[in-house]
Image (spheres, grey):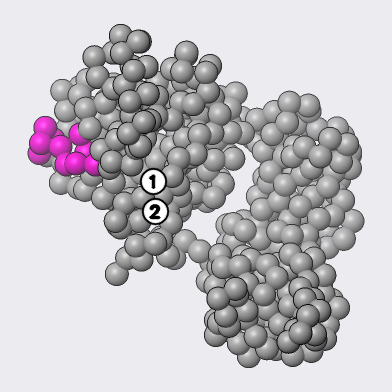
Amino acid sequence: MLDNNQLLRFTTAGSVDDGKSTLIGRLLYDSKSIFEDQLHAIENTSKKKGHNGVDLALFTDGLKDEREQGITIDVAYRYFTTPKRKFIIADTPGHIQYTRNMITGASTANVAIILVDARHGVIEQTKRHAFIASLLQIPHIIVCINKMDLVDYSEEAYNKVINQFEDISSKMLVTDVRFIPISALEGDNVVNRSKKMDWYQGAPLLHTLETMHISSDINKVDARFPVQTVLRPQREGFIDYRGYAGRVASGVFRKGDEVTVMPSGFTSKIKTIDTLKGELEEVYAPMSVSITLEDDIDISRGDMIVRSNNKPEPVQDIEVMLCWLHKNSAKPRAKYSIRHTSNEQKAMIKEVVYKINIDSLDRNIEDKDLNMNDISKVKIRTTKPLMVDSYRENRTTGSIILIDDATNETVAAGMIV
């Protein structure tokens, strides 16, 4: 049975003009998720531009530059809901110079929709986006072979793209890949099944998104609770209350569980699990709660409550796949603040092991400069231990960001190897 409140996050990726914004516009339009005033505004803009019908891409292309050029530059987030599920869409740009935007939009996604133009097949940009999706460990990939109307809805063109994509996905860590032939412009196989492609027996895109099993995407094995703040209400009925508030990063915690506080290593048992609506017997990711323990232990923000028989590794030297997000290059051996869950420490990039050539996917061990949009493997040293898991096992406790202390800007995002 599907939980009709379940939230699915998906990101769209593809080359420029492959129809990502049109596809999202079609999803919103055909699932009736657009307000009437929005629809009228877009109809008027479409008329001014000389289009016969509604230009669906305008539903997501919000920046003035984007509307003028007809491309997506920033990450546009859209929310819509159907009777079966809630959705958050991250519409990410296709240009190589916006690799960082794609990483931002895809980092929390359950599903990546990669669009391929049926006329051109798999191109360099497709390989790049598939590589980033596999690097970010997005559990499900849907390859939408778009513009089928321009190849006369040919099954041969569809199969050709499948063979090309399977060649590259075999080299990547992707387990669930699905293929859907669509025409975002005409609406074939987006919300409604296409009558023009009888040879395709699968479900349309929206039905696939509504019924896809995503409950197992969250790590339920490794119980991790990063403490964000300590609650001491100091009022009647709560004089001795000491609760540790935060969001469960992964796993399940139950009342009475034996837990260890990292990095101190002290152990205790869970006394209560509290929420605004009352006490709970158990809690799981990504719920936000306050946990009280049977013993008084010195715990503060940045500490982590874990199961005693399943602890993360406290490390000061970590290897990270890093995407450099800032226009200023990384300074050699410069100090940054590193943020990992609720823990913030000082850190230094000790070594750039290699950079990935996003076009060929080869490793470059000669070039050690980190510039905007570069993806590289680096070694980082922190001032105090971080309680980490590998990103492959736990996307929450396996990710970090680097912050420039002078400007307080986020300069890089990384996945712990």
The quadrant where residue 85 appears: bottom left
Where are the magenta residues, as a range? Answer: 188-198
- Viewer-proximal residue, 284 or 84? 84
Q: Main secondary structure of the magenta part?
A: loop
Task: Tell me the residue that label 1 is attached to.
Answer: 80
Image x and y of residue 341, in percent: 70, 59
Q: CA distance from mark 2 to mark 1?
A: 6 Å
Q: Residues within 10 Å of mark 1 (few under 14, many from 20)?
A: some
Quadrant occupied by the N terminus: bottom left
- Viewer-proximal residue, 215 or 289? 289
- Viewer-proximal residue, 390 or 254? 254
Q: Which mark is residue 371?
A: none
Q: Amino acid at mark 2?
A: Lys
Whether residue 327 is in magenta: the answer is no
The quadrant where residue 14 appears: top left
- 138 to 359, vertically: above or below: below
Q: In this rendering, does residue 348 appear at all?
A: yes
Q: Which mark is residue 86?
A: 2
Image x and y of residue 88, in percent: 45, 47
- Viewer-proximal residue, 33 or 133? 33
Circle 2/circle 1 CB separation < 8 Å: yes
Q: Amino acid at mark 1?
A: Phe
Image x and y of residue 204, in percent: 23, 44
Left/right placement of residue 24 relative to residue 250 reads left
Q: Earlier in the sequence, mark 2 or mark 1?
A: 1
Image x and y of residue 213, in percent: 36, 61
